[in-house]
Image (cartoon, rainbow, N blue to C red):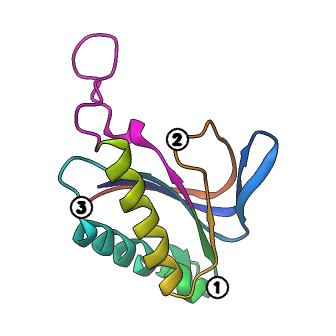
Amino acid sequence: MRAVIQRVSEASVTVEGTITGQIGLGILVYLGVGHGDTERNADAMVDKITTLRIFPDEAGKMNRSVQEAGGGLLVVSQFTLLGDCRKGRRPSFDAAAPPSEAKRLYAYFLERVRACGLPVGEGVFQAHMDVRSLNDGPVTFVLEL
């Protein structure tokens, strides 16, 4: 499981002109599900993202989690994170999980984040999405678990 996370002041996802998810302060999560990923991977990713101390404290140091900062998560499925561009000119997506399995684990991931009590926005699986964000920092991390 691979994620690119960005600390944001606000973010939204629009599908066919309709906003499907949005947050204010929080983390924009692009989530890719790979072959062999399980609920255990999703649980570990949720735990890492929701407790990662990337928000500033009173002294301006990254010392607060999204939970402590009172933020939310906007989660967007993105199989292209599993793309391999090392050979040729066209990415290979062999490492990406089949759509049915990826969709199941994406839904499970969302369920686990909601169980943490955080506000959650989401994209639409396999849809063409317009994602807008106001990056804060910018603060961006790549996670692979």
Image vertical order of residue 66 relative to residue 24, above or below: below
Q: Which residue is mark 2?
A: 126
Mark nearer the N terminus (3 vs 2) = 2
Q: Label 2's element?
A: loop
Q: CA distance from mark 3 to mark 2?
A: 22 Å
Question: Who's the residue at 23% across and 63% down the image?
Answer: 38
Relative placement, left or right, of 100 versus 22 is left
How many residues crowd around disc 1 within 10 Å: few (fewer than 14), some, or many (20 or more)?
few
Question: Who's the residue at 49% across and 86% down the image?
Answer: 116
Question: Who's the residue at 65% across and 40% down the image?
Answer: 129
Residue 39 percent location from the top left of the image:
27, 69
Q: Name the front one of labels 1 and 2.
A: 2
User: Which labelled disc corresponds to residue 145?
Assistant: 3
Q: Quadrant of residue 94?
A: top left
Q: Label 1's element?
A: loop
Residue 19 percent location from the top left of the image:
78, 53
Q: Name the front one of labels 3 and 2.
A: 2
**Quadrant assignment for the C terminus:** bottom left
**Quadrant assignment for the N terminus:** bottom left
Q: Quadrant of residue 44?
A: bottom left
Mark nearer the N terminus (1 vs 3) = 1
Residue 37 percent location from the top left of the image:
23, 57
Q: CA distance from mark 1 to mark 2?
A: 30 Å
Q: Which residue is mark 1?
A: 70
* Residue 116 appears in view: yes
Q: Magenta segment, which residues? A: 75-97
Task: Choose between 86 and 34: the one closer to the eye.
Answer: 34
Q: Taken as a whole, is the magenta stretch helix, strand or loop?
A: loop
Task: Choose between 126 and 138: the one closer to the eye.
Answer: 126
